[in-house]
Image: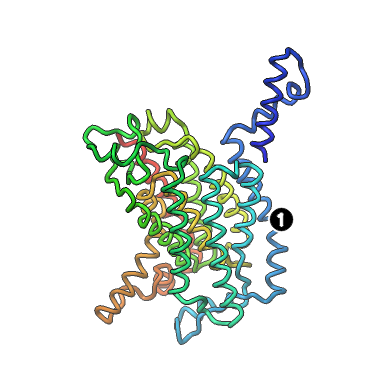
Amino acid sequence: MLPAIYDFWRQAFEAELASGQHGWAYMCSFLNLFQYITFRAASAGLLAFILSVICGPRVIRRLISLKVGQPLRTAEEVHKLAELHGGKVGTPTMGGALIIGSVLVSTLIFARPLNPFIALCACTMTACGLLGFCDDYKKVKEKKSDGISSRKKLAWQLGISLVAACFLYFKTEISGFGASPEQISEGLAGYRLGANPIGIGAICFPLLKIPIIDLHWGIIPFFALVIIGCSNAVNLTDGLDGLATGTTITVALSYALLAYLAGHFFMATEYLVIPHNRYIGELAVFLMALVGAGFGFLWFNCHPAKVFMGDTGSLAIGGALGTAALCTKQELLLVIIGGVFVMEAVSVILQVGSYKLRKKRIFKMAPIHHHFELLGWKENQVIIRFWIISIMLALFGLALLKIA
């Protein structure tokens, strides 16, 4: 909305300058502020926060009236953990709808919704959120902790991620990070991101100022894997009050900065030497809206939580963050910046693999945040310490941008 207002004002202002007259456009010169991504990104974050805080109590009351309490696993399933989480019984779930709504409204007002990066991230978030909603609804309806079967959920995630990956690969504006794969395949010796364009299929990492490899069309399944992996990793992290929400804020804020820098020609090509795209800066508005919505949701989700985001929120957030990492061409950096999410997912993989192969468990319970709970850490200790780790990893990841 605001960018459209700016475009209208600019046309009128230029017309007045050409005619030598001072009309309404001259008097409203403050509208020039709407062109700046920094202003709109900060405003989007603030609005998303305000919307979440204001609408939160109504959403929670509505969820309680609909009796959509989070089904918890029984003592037979989780043993001692059932005692630690006994007080959470009946806490409403599906609160992720508040995050999605706040982000989309703020994005529509402060961003250019037809920007391909904005449209892709918003659509991926909404699609993953709808999948999560169906999963939550099935859990609530059947009063069980098991929702949609893993196979069905993975199939839907695969479909969503493949659509997003194909859009990334074939959309001209998005693939405009550089030249065709043929140009890159001619040789990478002396090839610098700042001096030469790269194809959408190139894999980059800040430590190396040249593409690591170009996967060509093989980038499509890689993109899909990143989106699915990130979505499920956030879902696994969402097991304690505010844990996934706080970590989301850190990762989203980091990628908002990365998007802004990648859209700034001098900073991207001359100073940092990272992949540059003229349209990517707008994505910072969407990501800052996610940061604001995260803070607003954390207002109610902090321990003891009044509402859970459920799969509605965790799958949506993971899909959005994974897509944002692909859009900025910083897919591998997500492993560092989103290290807490990776740690949670890897702990589950190791636990399942170890039990199937050796009939022994590595951790007391997976995901790993439950392991520390069973070691005797208080829930608040686990949450805040994981937040600290997330902040440190984000700072380290951003510091890698200017190594050489």
Residue that appears at 41% across and 33% down = 268
Q: Which residue lies under the disc numbered 1?
A: 54
Is 214 on the left or on the right of 398, as rendered? Answer: left
Is 292 on the left or on the right of 326, as rendered? Answer: right
Q: Name the residue nearer the viewer: 70 or 305.
A: 70
The part of the image, by quadrant, that contains residue 296 is bottom right
Name the image colouring.
Answer: rainbow
x and y, in percent, of residue 332 in the image:
35, 50
Residue that appears at 70% across and 74% down = 66
Is 281 on the left or on the right of 201, as rendered? Answer: right
State the residue lying farthest toward the bottom: 76
Q: Name the residue nearer the viewer: 375 or 86.
A: 86
Q: Name the residue nearer the viewer: 301 or 156.
A: 156
Q: In which quadrant of the rendered image does the N terminus lie?
A: top right
Q: Residue type at mark 1: give it.
A: Ile
Q: In which quadrant of the rendered image does the C terminus lie?
A: top left
Q: Measured along the vertical axis of the image, is residue 276 above or below residue 296?
A: above
x and y, in percent, of residue 23 in the image:
78, 20
Residue that appears at 43% across and 53% down = 166
Residue that appears at 62% across and 44% down = 44
Q: Measured along the vertical axis of the image, is residue 19 above or below residue 185?
A: above
Q: How many marks?
A: 1
Dot 1 crowding, Cα within 10 Å, few <14, some 14–19, many 20+:
few
x and y, in percent, of residue 172 in the image:
45, 41
The part of the image, by quadrant, that contains residue 79 is bottom left
